[in-house]
Image: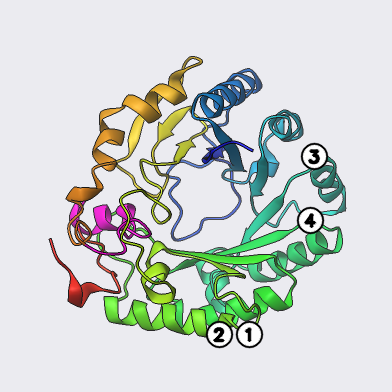
């Protein structure tokens, strides 16, 4: 066991049959990583984690990653180096044949999305997507592949999230996770007061599934001030991972500090050693680590656990170190 954990989110293709309202892809069908590049990127991921003394958590996604013609080779190569390996995908190609291949590849979980109950989910994603997703969840769980269900939360669907969480539990998901919608600019459509009430309700309702208030739910950094006591320590122990333990790689080899933060492009991967160099020395990464400059967080007792979401802050104000507009402690904000 290494000292740290490091998370790579790797988008291997832009191809996708859905057109979700909150998707970050602008040009579908345009890009996919080549097999040669994929093998070299995997080798660089491994080297990066060795240098950082970190266990690798690798999520392979898209677009729809199962549409990539070399997906099974990529997964099998990834399995040899990743401590935890996940696929973040769509339900359309979750069938008996592919499930057995996923099982053979040894993935740790498959993530699917539910963005509301049927009418809301299908409006956000595509007609019939809700039923396809439910079918995919049942097929995966029946085969013994853990399922994580993720929801993108906004002002248009947050009132349905308790029901989505309950449905996820009843379907046998191992975890339900959620994250706020990050628009190009503006906010997700919830006030700080509304968001706090939402988080409190989620945490209260979830206790029925597990004595640990966070046992089934993985969510926003802002859950910490709702469910935890402040730690008041200098080192980062949780919360927004921007600048601390994550990189994202796109199908055209663009490297980002966070896929949801549209201004966090660090450059393009070209050679072995690039990932470590981007992480350690890119000027943007150095900026992101200046947590003492985050407006509203610098003196907050939850700074080591939370720091809000920097992508949300940037969308709202154009400043990565700006205030998180949904901060549940907004009445206690200090500079």
Estimate the spatial distance between the alpha carbons at disc 1 and disc 2, rounded to whole Å: 6 Å
243 up-or-down from 153: above or below: above
Q: Provide the secondary structure element on which disc 4 rests.
A: loop
Q: Look at 38% across and 53% down and name the residue there.
A: 240
Q: Is residue 318 left or right of residue 3?
A: left
Estimate the spatial distance between the alpha carbons at disc 4 and disc 1, rounded to whole Å: 24 Å
Q: Provide the secondary structure element on which disc 1 rests.
A: loop
Question: Which residue is label 3 attached to?
Answer: 105
Q: Find residue 145 and name its label.
A: 4
Residue 193 at what x, y percent from top left?
Answer: 29, 81
213 up-or-down from 136: above or below: below
Which quadrant holds the C terminus?
Answer: bottom left
Question: Which residue is label 2 attached to?
Answer: 205
Q: Are marks 2 and 3 in contact (CB under 8 Å)?
A: no
Q: Look at 32% across and 75% down and name the residue there.
A: 190
Sequence-wise first label, 3 or 1: 3
Per the rendered image, the range of residues in magenta is 300-322
178 up-or-down from 63: above or below: below
């Amino acid at each position: 066991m290494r000292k740290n954990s490091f998370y790579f989110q790797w988008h291997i293709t832009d191809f996708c049959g859905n057109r979700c309202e909150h998707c970050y892809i602008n040009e579908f069908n345009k890009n996919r990583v080549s097999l040669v590049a994929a093998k070299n990127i995997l080798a660089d991921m491994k080297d990066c984690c060795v240098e950082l003394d970190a266990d690798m958590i690798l999520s392979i996604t898209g677009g729809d990653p199962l549409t990539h013609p070399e997906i099974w080779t990529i997964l099998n190569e990834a399995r040899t180096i990743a401590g935890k390996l996940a696929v973040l995908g769509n339900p359309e190609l979750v069938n008996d044949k592919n499930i057995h291949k996923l099982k053979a590849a040894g993935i740790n979980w498959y993530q699917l999305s539910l963005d509301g109950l049927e009418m809301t989910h299908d409006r956000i994603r595509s007609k019939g997507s809700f039923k396809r997703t439910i079918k995919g969840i049942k097929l995966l769980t029946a085969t013994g592949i853990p399922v994580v269900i993720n929801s993108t939360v906004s002002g248009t669907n947050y009132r349905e999230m308790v029901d989505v969480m309950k449905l996820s539990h009843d379907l046998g998901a191992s975890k339900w996770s959620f994250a706020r919608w990050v628009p190009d600019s503006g906010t997700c459509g919830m006030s700080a007061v509304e968001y706090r009430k939402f988080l409190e309700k989620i945490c209260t309702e979830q206790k029925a599934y597990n004595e640990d208030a966070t046992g089934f739910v993985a969510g926003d950094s802002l859950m910490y001030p709702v469910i935890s006591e402040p730690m008041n320590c200098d080192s980062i122990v949780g919360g927004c991972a921007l600048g601390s333990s994550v990189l994202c790689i796109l199908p055209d080899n663009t490297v980002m500090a966070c896929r949801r933060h549209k201004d966090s492009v660090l450059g393009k991967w070209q050679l072995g050693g690039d990932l470590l160099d981007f992480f350690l020395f890119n000027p943007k990464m150095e900026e992101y680590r200046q947590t003492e400059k985050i407006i509203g967080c610098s003196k907050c007792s939850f700074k080591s656990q939370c720091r809000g979401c920097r992508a949300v802050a940037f969308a709202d104000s154009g400043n990565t170190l700006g205030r998180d507009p949904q901060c549940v402690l907004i009445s206690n904000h200090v500079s």
